[in-house]
Image: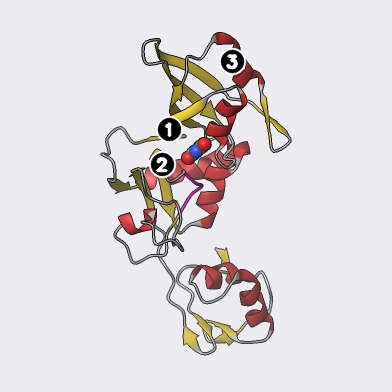
Amino acid sequence: MERLQKVIAEAGIASRRKAEELIVSGKVKVNNKVVTKLGTKVNPSDQIEVDNKIIEKENKEYYLLNKPRGVITSTSDDKNRKTVTELIETNCRIYPVGRLDYDTTGALLLTNDGDFANIVMHPSNNMEKVYLAKLEGVIKGEQINKLKNGVTLDGKVIKASRVKLKKVDNNTNKSLVEITIHEGLNHQVKRMFESVGFRVDKLTRKKIGFFDVTDLKSGEYRRLTPKEIQKVYSYKEK
Ligand code: URA
């Protein structure tokens, strides 16, 4: 069961606020009866009309994409750059869950289910994000400890849950570091490394929670299984 205003909004008829106005002003019918009470719950088999037009309810869709470089994590772009939603064949109005930078690759979830997106993005649900960062320079234990103990971003102390040094190349002066974080602040990984003196040359997200893209080539995607969707919902109850 879902709230009527949410179903109207998700069908793309109006914003949630506008949907509430439509309900209160008597323009919405559920199973042929006018409903003016906000918060009325409806189920998928209920017929909903707005201004005497039956609304088409969208099915929920869920995808995991291995995002390539040079694609923007958005549903549209004013500079005409390719967007992640263009990579997925669907008629549903799906959107990306969180963001990866234009030049960042790897695991990205897309859906038209707002509740699902909120669970994945909310740090309290502990869906960790694992990144592999190629750094300009050779990182030392002291700087890794700083990342673990916390650096200040946007006035908040942000700690990496784990930091693993995978490789150091003294000849080319590069380091490969795996870093795990909870939050999804803008450019978080790049800014965390910057705050300890390193520029990120290449960044890829290996995992979001239990989703990883090792079986997907760059630009490939797959639908999530019902089990995986349920598993994400179970994070909320933890
Ligand atoms: N952190 C970043 O800096 N960039 C991303 O794309 C994701 C996390």
Q: Main secondary structure of the magenta part?
A: loop
Q: Residues within 10 Å of mark 1 (few under 14, many from 20)?
A: many
> In terms of image quadrants, where is residue 126?
top right
* Residue 143 marker: 3
Instruction: Report the side of 187 relative to 130 (left or right).
Output: right
What residue appears at the point 38 percent right and 53 percent down from the top-left corner? 84
Q: CA distance from mark 2 to mark 3?
A: 24 Å
Q: In what element is the residue under mark 1? A: strand
Q: Position of residue 46 (x, y in %)?
A: 49, 74
Some atom of ligand 1 lies within 8 Å of the CB belonging to the residue at label 2: yes
On residue 203, the disc is: 1
The spot of residue 69 in percent (x, y) is 35, 43
Element type where label 2 sits in the image: loop
Q: CA distance from mark 2 to mark 1?
A: 8 Å
The residue lying toward the viewer, choosing from 191 and 31, is 191
Could you say where residue 219 lies in the image, as x and y percent from the top left? 29, 46
| Residue 55 is a magenta residue | no
Q: Secondary structure at mark 3?
A: helix
Residue, disc 2: 103
Q: Residue at 48% of width from left, 57% of height from top?
A: 113
Extent of the magenta region: 96-100
Query: Against 204, is 39 above or below?
Result: below
Q: Are marks 2 and 1 in contact (CB under 8 Å)?
A: yes
User: Residue, x 44% and y 51% (percent of image)?
Assistant: 73
What is the residue that sits farthest to the right in this orientation? 155
Looking at the image, residue 27 lies above or below residue 225: below
The disc placed on residue 112 is none
Q: Mark 2 Cα within 10 Å, few/some/many (few <14, many 20+)?
A: some
**Residue 210 visible within the image:** no
Q: Position of residue 156 (x, y in %)?
A: 72, 34
